[in-house]
Image (cartoon, rainbow, N blue to C red):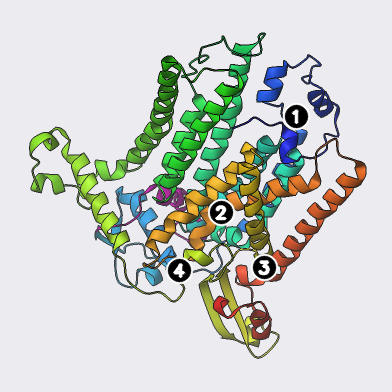
């Protein structure tokens, strides 16, 4: 848990007076920064509004890619056959309803009278409420139900830029991470289709970004409390710091992530433990006592406060996401408790809560007993190396009338990450583990914990049909890991010009390779009409077909 300076994780050259002042121990106004604060919480780059230009330009670029022809193909793609219609039901009835026969064709023809009785659904409502906002704005159309997912995808690029900037104290590396995120194929595809996985990823990324802000916030206050002695009073634990507003924000975002897809809740547990460990490391850095019983009690108090603040907030948000179900008398299993009276202490629990608990038990049973086969199902063992991508849409035998320059063209939306990016990130992940454990650099713990919490739990469900596109929630942590390793390659700010030159060449070379690879697979990410032979050349492995 040792504290490291921003240079430990690499970083761009300051290049500006404000940054140089920060490196020399002064704030942007030229006032000396106390040594303990400088050690516990190195100052962010002093580039002001200039620190927003790069991230915003990359976000605009990403938004353009995601919004351009967003309504194409003008049909329900893959699992869009469920979620947009669920979203429309939420918007009009407060709960999800069943669909009539040929509902997809009728909706595309403008007939929206296709909903019947309330339906049993297996995912919580928050992600579908997000889609409902787009449908409210633009109607029940492909553009409408995809719009807010595309916006969330674009905004995740901005969050990544600012998050990595804070993590590395480098605007350059923040922009690099955002750009790599923007040119990933899986991110692009899932930003342009109304599925739940990208919104869950967005809220999870935002939650961890809030925890990073909280880390700086609390370490600054610990440093202020410890000055001018350079440590807290010997034998004490330091100030309680019970009011942590950014932890409340994190809890809100974790709750929205879990209310979109349940698998995000496991990341809440992992990062909750990590943020508590950051606190322990910070208190150790200011000389807090652990051996005395009072110190142990305060350690437990910190853990309890963290749990209540983050997990408690997330639970409240999660339950609130079911407000439509609570308000409607027609929701699935809404009156289950009335037909199944409680006994013992269970009678103290409101019937609505008991009914919701039973509903969740049915959802869990569905997820753990699903045995249907699917041609694009894949083992999580191959996700990080893209062993089996998912074809979301496929049209064959297109001719000259459809703009084909040959006798046979195809269109495909293939859910596949930019291969070079993913493969480099897997290699970088091994370096992150080494720098975190052996180098004791806390920053590298974020990608390691992130990947572990969003990838490893899927192995216990490997016998049911699961898909590579679930890995979008893993992607941000892989991007962060690769960026941190590239920061190491770039070298510290005080490295020799030759060292920095070679480091910059590595960064530029990796970025160029990723961009070229992204451009190569772009036609099969966006439903472009291309000759069959061109499509086949992009199928590098048999398992991709």
Q: Is residue 51 left or right of residue 394?
A: right
Q: Is residue 190 above or below residue 28?
A: below
Q: Is residue 318 left or right of residue 384?
A: left
Mark 3 Cα-neighbour bin, 10 Å: few <14, some 14–19, many ≥20 = many
Quadrant where the image shows the N terminus: top right
Q: Quadrant of residue 368?
A: bottom left
- Label located before the other in sequence (1 or 4): 1
Picture coordinates of residue 462, whole percent (x, y): 40, 65
Mark 1 Cα-neighbour bin, 10 Å: few <14, some 14–19, many ≥20 = few
Q: Which residue is mark 4?
A: 78
Q: Can you see residue 86? A: yes
Picture coordinates of residue 359, whole percent (x, y): 23, 51
Q: Which residue occupies 56% across, 9% down? A: 233
Q: Which residue occupies 53% across, 64% down? A: 383
Q: Which mark is residue 522?
A: 3
Q: Nearer the viewer, mark 3 or mark 2?
A: 3
Q: Is residue 170 above or below residue 468?
A: above
Q: Is 22 or 524 nearer to us in this picture?
A: 22
Mark 4 Cα-neighbour bin, 10 Å: few <14, some 14–19, many ≥20 = some
- Spatial separation of the CA atoms under disc 1 and disc 4: 44 Å
Q: Which residue is mark 2?
A: 150
Q: Is residue 76 left or right of residue 281?
A: left
Q: Nearer the viewer, mark 2 or mark 1?
A: 1
Quadrant where the image shows the C terminus: bottom right
Q: Which residue is mark 1?
A: 48
- Spatial separation of the CA atoms under disc 3 and disc 1: 35 Å
Q: Which residues are magenta?
A: 118-144
Mark 2 Cα-neighbour bin, 10 Å: few <14, some 14–19, many ≥20 = many
């Amino acid at each position: 848990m040792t504290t490291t300076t921003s240079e430990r994780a690499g970083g761009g050259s300051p290049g500006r007076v404000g940054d140089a002042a920060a490196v020399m121990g002064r704030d942007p106004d030229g006032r000396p920064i106390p040594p303990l604060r400088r050690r516990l919480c190195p100052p962010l780059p002093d580039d002001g509004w200039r620190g927003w230009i790069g991230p915003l330009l990359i976000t605009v670029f990403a938004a353009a890619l995601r919004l351009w022809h967003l309504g194409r193909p003008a049909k329900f793609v893959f699992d869009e056959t469920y979620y947009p219609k669920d979203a429309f039901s939420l918007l009009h009835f407060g709960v999800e309803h069943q669909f009539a026969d040929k509902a997809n064709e009728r909706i595309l023809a403008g007939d929206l009278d296709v909903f019947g009785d309330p339906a049993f659904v297996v995912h919580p409502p928050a992600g579908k409420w997000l889609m409902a906002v787009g449908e409210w704005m633009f109607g029940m159309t492909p553009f409408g139900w995809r719009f807010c997912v595309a916006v969330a995808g674009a905004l995740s690029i901005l969050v990544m830029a600012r998050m990595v900037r804070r993590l590395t104290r480098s605007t350059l590396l923040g922009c690099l991470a955002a750009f790599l995120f923007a040119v990933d194929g899986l991110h692009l595809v899932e930003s342009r289709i109304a599925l739940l996985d990208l919104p869950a990823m967005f809220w999870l990324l935002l939650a961890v970004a809030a925890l990073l802000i909280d880390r700086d916030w609390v370490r600054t206050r610990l440093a202020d409390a410890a000055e001018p002695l350079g440590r807290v009073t010997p034998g004490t634990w330091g100030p309680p710091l019970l009011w942590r507003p950014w932890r409340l924000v994190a809890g809100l975002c974790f709750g929205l992530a879990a209310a979109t897809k349940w698998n995000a809740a496991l990341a809440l547990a992992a990062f909750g433990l990590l943020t508590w460990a950051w606190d322990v490391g910070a208190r150790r850095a200011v000389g807090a006592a652990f051996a005395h019983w009072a110190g142990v009690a305060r350690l437990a108090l910190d853990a309890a406060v963290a749990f209540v603040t983050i997990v408690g907030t997330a639970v409240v948000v999660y339950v609130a996401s079911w407000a439509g179900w609570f308000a409607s008398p027609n929701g699935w299993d809404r009156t289950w408790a009335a037909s199944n009276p409680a006994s013992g202490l269970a009678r103290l629990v409101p019937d609505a809560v008991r009914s919701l608990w039973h509903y969740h038990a049915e959802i869990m049973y569905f997820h753990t007993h699903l045995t249907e086969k699917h041609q694009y199902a894949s083992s999580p063992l191959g996700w990080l190396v893209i062993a089996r991508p998912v074809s979301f849409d496929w049209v064959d035998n297109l001719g000259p009338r459809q703009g084909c320059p040959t006798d046979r063209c195809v269109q495909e939306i293939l859910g596949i990450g930019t291969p070079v990016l993913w493969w480099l990130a897997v290699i970088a992940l091994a370096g992150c583990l080494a720098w975190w454990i052996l180098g004791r650099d806390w920053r590298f713990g974020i990608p390691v914990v992130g990947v572990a919490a969003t990838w490893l739990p899927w192995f216990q469900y490997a016998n049911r049909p699961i898909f590579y596109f679930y890995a979008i929630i893993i992607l941000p942590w892989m991007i962060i890991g690769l960026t941190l390793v590239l920061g190491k390659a770039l070298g510290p700010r005080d490295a020799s010009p030759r060292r920095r030159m070679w480091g910059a060449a590595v960064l530029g070379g990796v970025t160029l390779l990723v961009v070229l690879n992204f451009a190569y697979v772009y036609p099969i990410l966006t439903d472009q009409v291309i000759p069959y032979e061109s499509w086949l050349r992009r199928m590098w492995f048999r398992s991709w077909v």
